[in-house]
Image (spheres, helix red, strand yellow):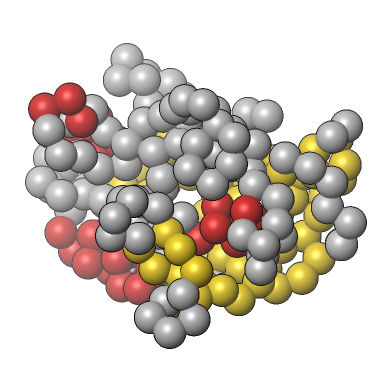
Amino acid sequence: MTIDSGLHIVSEDSCFVVINKPSGLLSVPGRGPDKTDCVSNRVRNLFPHCIEQPAVHRLDMDTSGLMVVALDSDSHRNLSRQFQRRQTSKRYIALLEGILSEQCGTLRLPFRLDIDRRPYQIYDEIHGKMGITHWERLGIEGEFTRVAFTPITGRTHQLRVHAAHERGLGIPIVGDPLYGNGTGPAQLKLHATELGFLHPRNGAPLTFHAPPPF
């Protein structure tokens, strides 16, 4: 269901909504008046009873796909705890800018913010925090490779770094303006295609799917 706000609502519950975020839209407000348009503010405009800070997790601005947004404080607390304790499940689909010969594997790379090139992340064995991602090659499409990523940790730009870095897959995601050859916003071919969590009130397991737009 797509409504006037431009949000595609996948599921609506009394205490949360699951949306399919388009590439190019912020998850939460950025700095400055030109960066107020985001998932959180659009949800708040749609649901007057929504809390002030409804986001429990984020997707990069250029990443598309599934996000869950809490509508009340108890649900926000519960869902945030699930993400912090890695009790959620997430799966992403990406298109890589080259041919990947291997079939599957697990990536473990420590990285951190480059304070001189925010928000760029750099490999750092000493001060970096470990990011862990399982990956699987889904197919070769011309000069590109379609892969599935299952992140175990949730570091900033984790999948983008793991794809592009020479100690990772060594092939950037198509359209990545930071770690690849993207030239503008909303070009990144990275999509959160599956999201699973426990209902914040009754504990029932829930899983949502959204096919990638590429």
Left or right: 120, with 177 as reference point: left
**21 in relation to 132, above or below:** above
Choose between 102 and 54: the one closer to the eye: 102
Left or right: 102, with 84 as reference point: right
Left or right: 137, with 173 as reference point: right
The x and y percentages for residue 56 are 29, 57
The quadrant holding residue 47 is top left
Left or right: 76, with 90 as reference point: left
**151 in relation to 117, above or below:** below
Q: Residue at x 23, y 60 (%)?
A: 76
The x and y percentages for residue 93 are 66, 46
Q: Residue at x 63, y 43 (%)?
A: 173
Choose between 184 and 200: the one closer to the eye: 184
Q: Residue at x 28, y 60 (%)?
A: 115
The quadrant holding residue 199 is bottom left
Q: Residue at x 66, y 68 (%)?
A: 167
Instruction: In the displayed orientation, state which residue is furthest to the top.
Output: 4
Number of marks: 0
The x and y percentages for residue 57 are 34, 56
The x and y percentages for residue 29 are 20, 39
The quadrant holding residue 82 is bottom left
Choose between 81 and 205: the one closer to the eye: 81
Residue 88 seen in this snapshot: no
**96 in relation to 213, above or below:** below
Q: Quadrant of the C terminus?
A: top right
**109 in relation to 199, above or below:** below
Instruction: In the displayed orientation, state which residue is furthest to the front.
Output: 116
Residue 31 seen in this snapshot: yes
